[in-house]
Image: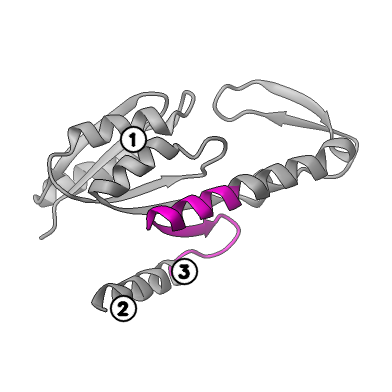
């Protein structure tokens, strides 16, 4: 009987469904998420600000993203101060490392821009940058007391989800 809502963000708030209890609302939420194509750039800071201004009650927020680039530090601090935040990081190994080979063609999923890079020259720096970004995000979530769940695209997610919520339930009981 919990209220469930959703917000889909790009560089703006694409959709906001205020939390409600009705079964038809949950079905609409699922339909909207499955049918709405992703497009545009991502600005989590701006999107999270819009969501926070729309929420009137303390909520459990699931922030689901690949968190490539900026981790939206200011908005996460604001969210953690008022809500129970669970950060779900979607990790695709192909985003973490470039092939260490000759020319590699890359296409930005948000802008559609194509770039040709030398994987031999760029691979190490790219991997190091991604490791740093992910470590910074992990430090930020620990500092703010935000739960951080990593789901990988190359592994089944069900067991990871069950273990996460089981551990969270035990921790919340203490």
Contact between labelled residues 1 and 2, with CB atoms less than 8 Å apart: no
| In-front residue for pair 2/149 | 149
Contact between labelled residues 3 and 2, with CB atoms less than 8 Å apart: no
Considering the numbered disc 2 on the image, is that residue within a helix, a strand or a loop? helix
| Gap in angstroms between the C-alphas marked 3 and 1 | 25 Å
Evaluate whether residue 37 shows in this view.
Answer: no
Q: Where does the image place residue 171, in percent across and percent down from the top left?
A: 32, 75
Considering the numbered disc 3 on the image, is that residue within a helix, a strand or a loop? helix
The quarter of the picture where residue 57 lies is: top left
Q: Where does the image place residue 9, in percent across and percent down from the top left?
A: 36, 32
Q: Earlier in the sequence, mark 2 or mark 1?
A: 1
Q: Residue at x 58, y 30 (%)?
A: 109
Q: Which residue is mark 1?
A: 48
Say above or below: 9 vs 120.
above
Answer whether residue 171 is magenta in the image: no
Mark number, residue 160:
3
Q: Earlier in the sequence, mark 2 or mark 3?
A: 3
Q: Residue at x 27, y 42 (%)?
A: 31
Q: Residue at x 49, y 25 (%)?
A: 41
Within 10 Å of disc 1 (Cα), the crowding (few <14, some 14-19, many 20+) is: many
Of circles 2 and 3, the one toward us is 2
Q: In the picture provided, is 139 more to the left or to the right than 44?
A: right
Mark number, residue 170:
2
Q: Earlier in the sequence, mark 3 or mark 1?
A: 1
| In-front residue for pair 76/126 | 76
């Amino acid at each position: 009987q919990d209220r469930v809502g959703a917000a889909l963000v790009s560089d703006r708030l694409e959709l906001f469904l205020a939390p409600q209890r009705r079964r038809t609302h949950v079905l609409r939420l699922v339909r909207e998420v499955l049918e709405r194509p992703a497009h545009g750039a991502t600005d989590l800071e701006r999107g999270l600000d819009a969501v926070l201004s729309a929420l009137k009650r303390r909520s459990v927020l699931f922030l689901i993203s690949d968190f490539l680039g900026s981790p939206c530090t200011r908005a996460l601090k604001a969210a953690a101060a008022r809500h129970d935040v669970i950060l779900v990081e979607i990790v695709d190994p192909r985003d973490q490392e470039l092939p260490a080979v000759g020319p590699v063609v890359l296409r930005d999923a948000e802008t559609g821009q194509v770039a040709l890079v030398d994987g031999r020259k760029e691979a190490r720096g790219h991997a190091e940058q991604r490791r740093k970004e992910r470590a910074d995000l992990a430090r930020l979530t620990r500092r703010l007391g935000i739960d951080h769940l990593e789901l990988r695209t190359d592994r089944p997610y069900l067991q990871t989800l069950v273990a996460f919520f089981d551990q969270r339930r035990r921790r919340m009981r203490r």
